Amino acid sequence: MKLHSKSATLLIALSVLPLFAFAQVSDNEVKIGVMVDKTGVYSANGGPGAVRAVEMAVQDFGGKVHGKPIQVLSADYQNKVDIAATKGREWFDREQVDMIIESTDSAAAIALQKLGAEKKKVMIFAGSASTALTNNECSPYGIHYVYDTYALATGTGRAVMQEGGDSWYFITADYAFGSSLEKDTTKVIQKMGGKVHGTRRHPLNATDFSSFLLQAQTSKAKIIGLANAGKDTQNAVRQAAEFGVGRSGQKLATLLVFDTDIKGMGLNISQNLLFTTGFYWDYNDETRNWSKRFYAVHGAMPTMIQAGAYSATMHYLKAIQSAGTDNADAVTKKMKETEINDFFAKGGKIRANGRMVHDMYLAEVKTPAESKGEWDIVRIKRVISGEQAFQPLSENTCFLGK
């Protein structure tokens, strides 16, 4: 059967029309939910700053995608898994939220990962660290963007071992993140011939670390590894200084540190600490320019969570633009196909299991004498390539991409 010449011409014309001519945005709006700790132990690391970073990305994108408005919602999950899960379900079911980005703890993130898989909605993890998110708890709709416990252990653990710190005692936060970080660091230590003399677990938002530090000192381990974060890390470091940990010959290894922690502790206490980070505001002209814009709206330089939240949101919106729809399957496919090149990451790639692979950095806190300004607090000692920093696919247990 032959097509009429006019019909054939019409079909050809339709086939070459740009995708956005048929763009489909559900509910005529793209809604992004930002799940953060607004007032608690992690509020400075992500918190309101992560919300502002997402809002900046939306504004920089133009506030619309395919002519439809982009709305940002935010919620304080109060460091409680049940609140995170309930609010996430409410957002998806009642508010028609299309994507949730979090800066929470790992236990809440795992609950949100399961919810995203159930609802077929995009979940982006900017602040949680557990490698379970890209292993046994992976999802086709989950993207782990900034860092994880494998990268932290590879960076800091390896560096400390290379400098002779071959015996460890862990003080670990008693929830999914702390356990994962201790486990991944222990693997590095043992692989490099070191030993772990013991571990003590503490509750979230602990104020008194004296008994933990005394036991760590008694162990005679060369390194006291802090597998915690936020104000817990700050309190432990301050009290370790009071206990004379550095003077006794033992050293601290802070396995997750943010710029805001260093500011909170001050350079007198935190100087010379080694840590691994996915971003530093003063690394190059691109990071400085964006960070100064962020400072203007937030009053502080960004952490890696906040910078990563901006980058991830922008990557998500570009994927909607390119895919011609906000459908989660099409968007995550486009996100995984598209390389990330911005101030946060160069050559970043999202694997089938959702892990965004990018360079990490081994950093060292400056001394007060070295600092030339309020936020001149860190030097980057070494770049850790993404392939070295993150878990190799040969060790991965996610069903995706097998």
Image (cartoon, helix red, strand yellow):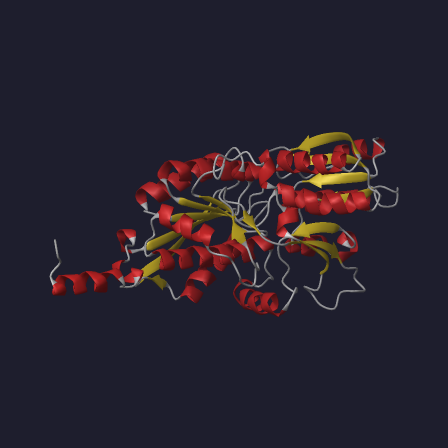
Q: Quadrant of residue 2?
A: bottom left
- Is residue 94 visible from the viewing direction of this image? yes
Which residue occupies 22% across, 62% down? Answer: 12
Q: Residue at x 70, y 38 (%)?
A: 185
Q: Left of 282 or right of it: where is 309?
A: left
- Establish if 233 lies above or below 114: below
Residue 266 pos. (x, y %): 73, 56
For the point 73% across and 30% down, the residue is 199
Viewer-proximal residue among 237 and 106: 106
State the image coordinates of residue 101 (x, y, percent, origin top left). 46, 49
Whole-percent x, y for residue 107 in the image: 53, 36
Q: Is residue 130 visible in the rendered structure shown here?
A: no
Q: Nearer the viewer, residue 108 or 77?
A: 108
- Identify whether 65 is placed above or below 254: below
Residue 44 appears left or right of 377: left
**x then y, percent, for residue 397:** 55, 33
Near-viewer residue (341 or 105): 341
- Residue placed furthest toward the right: 248
